[in-house]
Amino acid sequence: MKILGIESSCDETAAAVVEDGRRVLSNVIASQVEEHKIYGGVVPEIASRRHTEAICGVVEKALSDAGCTINDIDAIAVTYAPGLIGALLVGVNYAKGLSYSTRIPLVPVHHLRGHIAANYISNEELKPPFISLVVSGGHSHIINVKDYTVFEIIGRTRDDAAGEAMDKAARTVGLPYPGGVNLDKISVNGDENKYKFPVPKVADSKYDFSFSGLKTVAVNLVHNASQKGEEVKAEDLGASFIKAVTDLLVSHTMEAVEDFNAEKIVLAGGVSANSRLRKVMEEKCAGKGVELYKPELKYCGDNAAMIASQGYYEFLAGKKSDLTLNAVASMPITEE
């Protein structure tokens, strides 16, 4: 079964064709990173306009690269939530028009479900149930994945997402967008024990996260040093900040694994590409005898292959939509 996936939730216009949820036949991404870099982050209006300009060509190339035509497609899967509303609408409306004109079933896909499904592409043997740590610029969740389309939220951030906090820390030390990626690159040469950060705790949930305080500490540290004429090395602050964030992510996830008697951990989302997160999680899982699954780096960020993969399982579960489908800026992963 061939699924055409379409993704436009933020600043990547993407389309892909995936067979049976696992085999990627094509994966095309039109990135806007360079355009948004001068603003220090994604400008929603610009993102929406660029999606409109790119989407036709991106879908056509995805079909061409897969060696098929639209007539070979069994279903069209599209990201409809969550994300930037203007950006989402471009992908959703394009998919609706394509579905209407071809009579091919339309399958709505939650963006975070797609990130988890990236692991089905990278790890053919992976099957639910498992615990997934989903971390990105907009989300930080610990999810109990009971089946391909059945999810339970165990923990979540109460304020900033981990990726957002990394982006802000990067900007504080003068690194360009995308901040988290650049912070990771320079931190490998830094001293992760140079600066001490607090360990945030959420009183009524041992699985929930809080990253806003860590971000504030980083900003104040740089500001105070500047007032005193002292130097803060970006690589040292970056390494120390990433250590604080990843230690929090790993400790909460490992606690959930123990409490839920899980045998597998799945990393997902853009921050799953972070080198220290991957390294520390590997070490912890090896010590506990827990299997660890990670997406290939090319599938960590936003892409349409992951949407097509999850779309396959949603389609098998009977999830389809008509032309009333609308984009939704914010929606829990558990909502249908």
Image: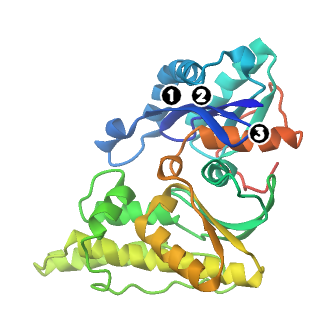
In the displayed structure, does residue 74 sit left or right of residue 47?
A: right
Q: Quadrant of residue 22?
A: top right
Depth check, front residue: 173 or 263:
263
Give how far across and how far down residue 80 sits, in percent: 69, 39
Which residue extends farthest right?
318
Depth check, front residue: 231 or 142:
142
Q: Residues within 10 Å of mark 2 (few under 14, many from 20)?
A: many
At horizontal 66% and vertical 39% (from top left) the residue drawn is 23
Q: Secondary structure at mark 2?
A: helix
Image: 198 above or below 214: below
Between the C-alphas of marks 1 and 3, the distance is 24 Å
Residue 56 seen in the figure: yes
Q: Look at the image and tell me in which quarter the N terminus lies.
A: top right
Which residue extends farthest front?
125
Picture disc at residue 51: 1
Nearer-N-terminus badge (2/1): 1
Disc 3 designates what residue?
A: 312
